Amino acid sequence: MVQIICFNYTPRDTQKVRKIKLIMLPLFGGALKHKNMKDLTQELNELHELFLKGSEYESKFAEKLEYIKVSFTSDTDIQLINEAVDKMMNTVESNLNELSVKIQLAEVEGFLNLAYIAKHYFGKTKNWLYQRLNGYLVNGKKAKFNEEEIEIFNRALSDMSMKLGSLRVH
């Protein structure tokens, strides 16, 4: 069993966490015969819908995945199933990466001046920084930090940490 943590993100609710246990069942040979069996694409689309609904549909997701794996057993079907599950897992990983900066800052968010960081370390506006922290759509694309910006952000946090750590009031 593999446990996946997925973030259901909206601008109003940035840290609603839902857990989905994705049960990876062994793939069996020998197809079961079912009347009115839907085609694999339709079944995978329904599985994806259950995946998006979150942990309250965990058991239905597991049942649907088991049904699909037992019902569709050709090599091509198995490959499509594995690709669909991999895509769902990549979606989760992508969401985690996009929100990880925001989540990491949650504990210190109250006393960090993000406008100062944006201006002094990035030479940008606070809105630019908030767009990346919250994953807002900018020109039709999700705003996110690139590798260089992550490094700059880490240097900014380190710099501010050293300044605060060395500060003594007499």
Image: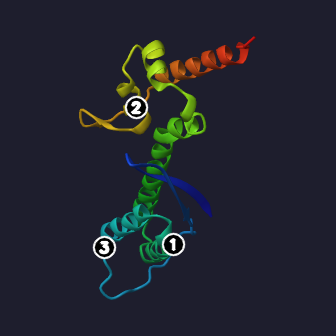
For the N terminus, which image quadrant?
bottom right
Q: Percent x, y for residue 42?
A: 30, 69
The image position of residue 6, as x and y in percent, is 50, 53
Give SS at disc 3: loop
Residues 33 and 3: in front is: 3
Residue position for label 1: 62
Residue corresponding to mark 2: 130
Contact, CB < 8 Å: mark 3 with mark 1? Answer: no
Answer left or right for 136 relative to 30.
left
Name the residue tied to disc 3: 39
Which residue: 47% across, 54% down? 86
At numbered mark 2, what does the secondary structure look like: helix, strand or loop? helix
Amino acid identity at mark 2:
Tyr
Give the residue drawn at x 52%, y 18%: 152
Q: Amino acid at mark 3?
A: Asp
Q: Is the C-beta separation of discs 1 and 2 under 8 Å?
A: no
Measure the alpha-carbon separation of dots 3 and 2.
Answer: 44 Å
The image's mark for residue 92 is none
Is disc 1 surrounded by few (<14), some (14 to 19) or many (20+) residues within 10 Å?
many
Residue 118, percent across and down?
Answer: 44, 20
